[in-house]
Every structure is written in structure tokens, then in C-alpha cells.
Amino acid sequence: MNFLSHYYFERNNPDQFVVMGVVLPDLIKNADKFWNIHPQKTPALFQDQQSQASILRGWNKHLEVDNYFHTSEFFKTETANLKKLILPCVTAGPVKPFFLAHIGLELMLDHLLLHSGMINIETFYLQLQQANSTALREFLAKAEIPDQGIFDVFLNDYLDSRYLFSYQKLHNISYALKRICMRVWENPFTEAQTEMLTQKLDEYCPELESRFMTIFNELEENPAIRAI
């Protein structure tokens, strides 16, 4: 799942550190795709400070949600549906259809949460700003992040850009997908392919909108996730 879908599960939580934790794994991967930290393996390091314990709680929920989501029937069915629809967009070029369908589904879920008013993105950014603090840096130091300075620059740029607001418009999802693919392939799409992708996502959106909340409801009712 992507940032806003993870935030959905803490949308009513006033604890900004839990909110930071629930998107922190993706923030770290966006800062550097080769970084791997595993604070969940050393929970005792973070229990002496409430703010750091809250970050770890959010982190653990992120992992549990992603694990369930990626093995769910919803994920299997919808990625297959979307893959079939977008195949004409990737007949030429290096992009793998399953990769595009996987990421495309996740971004579409973010779009639909915004479109339906299920989350308040202003609150999301405000809480991340509040959590961008010494407590976060101490958490990351204990978790042995490879380069705190690089992450700080990335996080500040992420917060300043507020680019998730752009997900309110469907055509921006295609360009977000292109940017993500550019991390893997140098020239993933032509402009014509990007336009075709927008058209296919526009076709898919009403279908997904009719059933997208089923996975969020399923996740919220899951005992392992509720326990975190």
C-alpha cells in the first residue's frame, strides 16, 4: 500500500509519532531504495521513550498491513484486472506489466481515498511536520539508518512538496507511475504511452471505486492488525 492508504488506518489518531511510523518504511525506501532497517527486531531499544515507542507501533502496523494486503484475494484479483487493462500501454518498452499493475493499484487506492473524502490530507501533512523532530532522528539512529543527513533532506523535500495533493486528479497518477518506473528503467514510457495509461486508469477507476473499501474494511477487522 502507498502513503495515504497506510495513513487511513491511523486517520483518527492524534499521536503524530504513530502516523509518522505508519509511513516511515516507505519514506525510507523513497529516500534510498537500497536501505534496509529493521527496528521491529529490537523493540527494547525504543521502549524507554513514548514517542519512539509510538513510531515503532506505527512501523509494525505498516508491516502487518502490507503483509496482509499483498497476500489478499483483493490484491490478486485487482492486479490481474488492471494488468489485463494496461497491457496495450506496455507492449513496447521495458516496463513489466505486473509491476505497473501492482504500483498502479496502490496509487489508485490513494486517489479514491482522497476522492471520496475518507482522509484529511492536511492533517496528514501537519502530523508528519510535528513528528519531524529529535525523537524521529533518535529513533532512526538507534535503527542504524545508513545516512541521517540524506534522509533529513529527503523528508524535508517530501513535506515541502506536498505532492500527494496531486493524487486528487486521476491524470496525475499516470505521471506518478512514470516517475516511479524511472527509478528502475531510464525511459519507461513515451508521452503517448502515458496518455494511453491515463485513459486505461480512467476506465478502471469506476470499477475499483465500487469495491475498493472492501479491502480497507477487511484490514481494519483483522485481529492481528487491530492488536497493534
Image: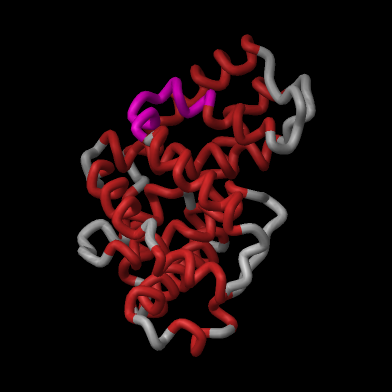
The image position of residue 214, as x and y in percent, is 34, 54
Relative to the observer, which residue lies in front, 23 or 52? 52
The image position of residue 223, as x and y in percent, is 36, 79
Relative to the observer, which residue lies in front, 156 or 59? 156
Whether 170 is among the magenta residues is yes
Locate residue 124 relative to residue 195 in the image: left or right: left
The magenta span reads: 165-175
The image position of residue 8, as x and y in percent, is 31, 55
Locate residue 121 relative to residue 138 in the image: left or right: left
117 w.r.t. 37: above or below: above
The image position of residue 147, as x and y in percent, is 64, 58
Residue at 53% in and 30% down: 176
Residue at 38% in and 48% down: 4
Q: Is residue 64 visible?
A: no
- Judged by its main secondary structure, the magenta piece is helix
Q: Quadrant of the C terminus?
A: bottom left
**Quarter of the figure with residue 172:** top left
